[in-house]
Image: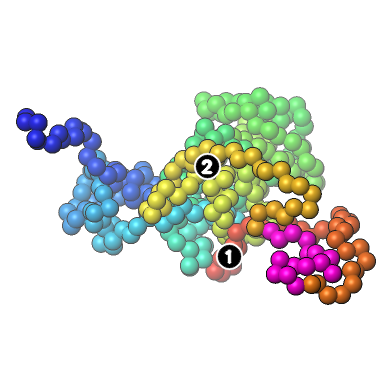
């Protein structure tokens, strides 16, 4: 090679772009695993050609269709809180013809995926997202997020009965991690418990209760990590503000594709110490006394009011308004 010939970058064995299943997941069509099944079923085409393997990288220049419909640009990651009612399954389709949570969602909701599942007869908080990467991250066992439940059991539990659950038990050859279990109250033949666990195995609480001779007749998930059910009514949906999604998940919008990526550690900036009476950034100082001159040179008319410039006394605790809720709440259109 002569000196006048520009050097070429070394060829990489990895083709440009991202795996097709990852792109479909980011577009909110399905989880990566579900996207791979869609590909194997022949439902996905790239540039007009049907593909049958997820081992394909695509770029924004490629035209992708699923079931003949074009796949658009991914939206920014979004997360919703949903109060799942009883009697619905957490799947897209049910072979037995039962109603699904996706039949229950408001019509103006975009295509979303559930984060984990709740059983047919379980109710309470279920997280929904339009981003497959967010779904994957929220479901990671390494999060160690506590899921808290209110559980009604038939029977009269005692601390001795519940102690094996706190230490961790094995049910049908499957090990369950220790749970936090507290007895709230006995109500006739039933008792209410609060249970917390950090994993989500199939029917874990119901199976664990059966192992200590208690039968669950109601199960309500009240929290998932930092996210709370709060006052959401069955069937209602509330979208989290993007700032909350970013702060709680450590995510930010990387570019116009809306891909969720790991947030960089925030740089700590020390606040400048201000002198008493000096206005802060973006905020005007206290108005001047009557008789003083404004910044434009005008004299402020009138007489000083009694107590001028003094801070107001603190409100009694009873007068403090309730904190504002975040997000937008939408009621389900499902008929009872």
For this orientation, the residue located farthest to the left is: 2
Counting from the top left corner in percent of width and height, residue 8 is at: 15, 35
* Residue 228 highlighted magenta (yes or no): no
Sequence-first tag of 2 and 1: 2
Tell me: 111 left or right of 106.
left
Tell me: 245 left or right of 288.
left
Q: Which residue is found at the position 57% from the left and 45% from the top?
A: 247
Counting from the top left corner in percent of width and height, residue 133 is at: 43, 45
* Residue 284 highlighted magenta (yes or no): yes
Counting from the top left corner in percent of width and height, residue 154 is at: 71, 42
Q: Residues within 10 Å of mark 2 (few under 14, many from 20)?
A: some
Q: Which residue is found at the position 48% from the left and 68% from the top?
A: 107
Q: Quadrant of the N terminus?
A: top left
Counting from the top left corner in percent of width and height, residue 295 is at: 71, 66
Q: SS of the residue at dot 2?
A: loop
Return the residue at label 2: 250
Marks 2/1: CA–CA distance: 26 Å
For this orientation, the residue located farthest to the bottom is: 301
The quadrant holding residue 28 is bottom left
**Secondary structure mostly seen in the magenta stretch:** loop
* Magenta residues (range): 283-298
Q: Which residue is found at the position 48% from the left and 63% from the top?
A: 109
Q: Observer-nearest residue: 23 or 200?
A: 23
Tell me: 326 left or right of 174.
right
Q: Which mark is residue 57?
A: none
Q: Which residue is found at the position 61% from the left and 26% from the top?
A: 169
Q: Which mark is residue 330?
A: 1
User: Does residue 121 appear in this view?
Assistant: no
Q: SS of the residue at dot 1?
A: strand
Q: Observer-nearest residue: 119 or 197?
A: 197
**Residue 23 position (above or below residue 183):** below
Q: Observer-nearest residue: 79 or 252?
A: 252
């Amino acid at each position: 090679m002569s000196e006048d010939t520009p050097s070429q970058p070394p060829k990489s064995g990895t083709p440009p772009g991202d795996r097709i299943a990852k792109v479909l997941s980011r577009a909110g069509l399905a989880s990566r695993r579900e996207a791979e099944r869609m590909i194997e079923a022949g439902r996905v085409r790239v540039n007009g050609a049907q593909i049958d393997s997820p081992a394909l990288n695509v770029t924004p220049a490629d035209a992708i269709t699923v079931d003949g419909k074009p796949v658009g640009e991914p939206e920014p990651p979004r997360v919703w809180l949903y109060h799942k009612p009883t009697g619905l399954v957490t799947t897209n389709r049910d072979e037995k013809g039962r109603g699904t949570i996706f039949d229950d969602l408001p019509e103006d909701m975009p295509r979303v995926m559930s984060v984990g599942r709740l059983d047919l007869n379980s109710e309470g908080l279920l997280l929904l997202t339009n981003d497959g990467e967010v779904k994957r991250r929220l479901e990671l066992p390494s999060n160690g997020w506590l899921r808290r439940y209110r559980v009604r059991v038939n029977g009269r539990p005692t601390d001795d009965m519940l102690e094996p659950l706190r230490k961790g038990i094995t049910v049908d050859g499957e090990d369950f991690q220790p749970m936090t279990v507290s007895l709230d109250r006995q109500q006739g033949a039933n008792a209410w418990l609060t249970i917390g666990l950090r994993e989500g195995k199939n029917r874990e609480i119901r199976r664990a209760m059966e192992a200590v001779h208690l039968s669950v007749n109601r199960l309500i998930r009240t929290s998932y990590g930092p996210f709370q059910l709060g006052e959401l009514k069955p069937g209602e949906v509330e979208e989290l503000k993007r700032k909350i999604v970013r702060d709680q998940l450590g995510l930010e919008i990387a570019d116009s594709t809306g891909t969720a990526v790991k947030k960089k550690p925030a740089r700590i900036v020390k606040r400048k110490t201000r002198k008493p009476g000096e206005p802060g950034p973006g905020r005007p100082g206290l108005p001047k006394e009557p008789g003083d001159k404004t910044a434009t040179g005008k004299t402020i008319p009138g007489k000083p009011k009694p107590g001028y410039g003094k801070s107001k006394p603190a409100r009694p605790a009873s007068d403090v308004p309730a904190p504002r809720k975040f997000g937008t709440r939408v009621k389900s259109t499902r008929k009872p």
